[in-house]
Amino acid sequence: MSALYLLVLASIVVAGFFLMAFIWSVRSNQYEDKQGAAIRMLQDDEIKSIN
């Protein structure tokens, strides 16, 4: 039973870490460019030859 308590506690700590990382990324405007990837996908890139 003590191993179960340890695993539950460890999973809560890891989940808290990922929650804090997500909150930090939202507050530092990591998701600000919502249209950039969609537009970039439609642009034609020139294929550079290796020769």
Image: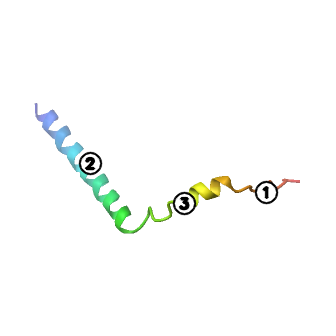
Q: Is residue 5 left or right of residue 43?
A: left
Question: In the displayed structure, would residue 19 be above or below residue 28?
Answer: above
Q: Is residue 45 left or right of residue 16?
A: right
Residue occupying the far top of the picture: 1
Q: Element under label 1?
A: loop
Using the image, tell me which numbered label, if any, was put on residue 29. none
Quote the CA–CA distance across marks 1 and 3. 21 Å
Q: How many dots with numbers?
A: 3
Quote the CA–CA distance across marks 1 and 2. 43 Å
Q: Which residue is mark 1?
A: 46
Q: Which residue is mark 3?
A: 35
Question: In the displayed structure, would residue 27 be above or below residue 40?
Answer: below
Q: Which residue is mark 2?
A: 15
User: What percent of the width, then of the height, locates residue 14?
Assistant: 27, 48
Residue in the image at 28% along x and 58% along y: 20
Residue occupying the far left of the picture: 1
Mark toward the start of the polypeptide (1 vs 3): 3
Q: Residues within 10 Å of mark 3 (few under 14, many from 20)?
A: few
User: What percent of the width, then of the height, locates residue 44?
Assistant: 74, 55
Quote the CA–CA distance across marks 3 and 2. 30 Å
Residue in the image at 57% along x and 57% along y: 37
Q: Nearer the viewer, mark 1 or mark 3?
A: 3
User: What percent of the width, then of the height, locates residue 12?
Assistant: 21, 46
